[in-house]
Every structure is written in C-alpha cells, then in structure tokens.
Image (tube, rainbow, N blue to C red):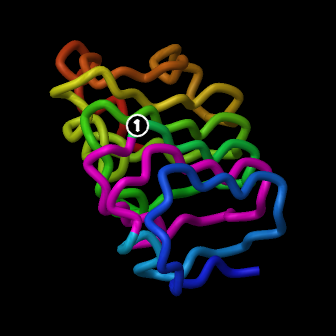
C-alpha cells in the first residue's frame, strides 16, 4: 500500500502504525503545514528509504517514528523538513550503514535544539558504542566525522 497525496485536511497527528505501507508518495506531506506527530511503526517501508520519501513541511514537527520497518539503509535526503526539536525514532530496524552522508546531515539540522535520532536495536556491523540511543545532535561536536564512514 502507498500513502498517496490528496489529503485536504491539515492534520496535527498522522498515525499509520501496523499497516502494510510499503512507500510514501513524494509530496505526500506538502499540505500538512501543522503536522506535529507522524508515526508509521511496524509498516514495511524498508529496506531503503529513498531521497524525498519523508519530506516534511511543518515548523511544528516534533516526532517522527519509523520503528520496526526493516529499514537497512537511508539515502542522504530520505527524511527532510524536520526541525531542530524533532525526535526521529528509527529503533528496531536493520540499519547497517551508518553513513556520514545521512546521519551527519541530520545531526547538523538537529544541532540547534533538543532533537535526536533514536537508533536503539539496530544491527550495526560496528562495535562502537557511538550508536547508543538517543543520538543527540550535540554529539557531532564531540565525535570525529570519520566514525560514520564505512
């Protein structure tokens, strides 16, 4: 199932958990200018989140949860339009490629606030404890960028 554009209601919360959603149409979130909470846990968005998959257009966005989606990789602009206060939860996926291109871009966007990326229970081939949850944007200043390169 694909989430398709066409909503005329500006929702504050959109919870699609536990549905057989395999993709999100580009531009789906364009009319959600007041979206505060998006949750699509235990759907089937993986294995790859491609550029533009989750392109948000809300200054109010505080919570994005994509847990349990069998996501193993993310392109550099797969999740965009979030604020520095947004919590991005990617727990319970199969992310193996913690690449500089994706995570550093996200952390730079989050660095001005209290937002974070939750990577709990992901399968990393790295034994580094750097991927502990929550991955706060402030850590970008304390960690060498090479940590993300594979």
Seen in the picture, residue 76 relative to 104 is either above or below; the reply is: below
Under tag 1, what secondary structure? loop
Q: Looking at the picture, does residue 63 appear above or below residue 12? A: above
Name the residue carrying label 1: 62
Residue at 52% in and 86% down: 6
Quadrant in which the N terminus is drawn: bottom right
Query: Is residue 97 highlighted in magenta?
Result: no
Tell me which corner region of the image, top left, top right, bottom left or bottom right, holds residue 148.
top left
Q: Does the magenta segment cover residue 44?
A: yes
Q: Quadrant of the C terminus?
A: top left
Query: Residue 44: horizontal and vertical position, in percent?
Result: 76, 63
Which of the 4 image quarters holds residue 79?
A: bottom left
Q: Is residue 111 visible?
A: yes
Return the x and y of residue 57 as percentages of the image width and height.
30, 62
Report the predominant secondary structure element of the magenta stretch. Answer: loop
- Residue 24 is situated, as x and y percent measured from the top left of the image, at 58, 75
Q: Kindly identify the residue that appears in the image at 42 percent across and 63 percent down.
A: 78
In this rendering, position of residue 111 left or right of residue 51: left
What span is in magenta?
32-61
Residue 51 seen:
no
């Amino acid at each position: 199932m694909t989430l398709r554009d066409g909503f005329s209601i500006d929702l504050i919360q959109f919870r699609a958990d536990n549905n057989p959603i395999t993709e999100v149409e580009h531009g789906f979130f364009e009319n959600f200018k007041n979206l505060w909470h998006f949750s699509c846990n235990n759907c089937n968005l993986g294995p790859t989140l491609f550029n533009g998959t989750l392109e948000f257009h809300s200054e109010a966005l505080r919570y994005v949860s994509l847990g349990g989606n069998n996501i193993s990789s993310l392109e550099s602009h797969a999740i965009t339009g979030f604020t520095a206060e947004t919590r991005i939860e990617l727990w319970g996926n199969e992310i193996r490629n913690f690449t500089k291109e994706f995570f550093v871009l996200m952390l730079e966007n989050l660095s001005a606030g209290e937002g974070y990326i939750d990577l709990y229970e992901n399968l990393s081939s790295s034994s580094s404890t750097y991927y502990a949850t929550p991955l706060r944007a402030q850590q970008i200043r304390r960690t060498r960028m090479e940590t993300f390169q594979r």
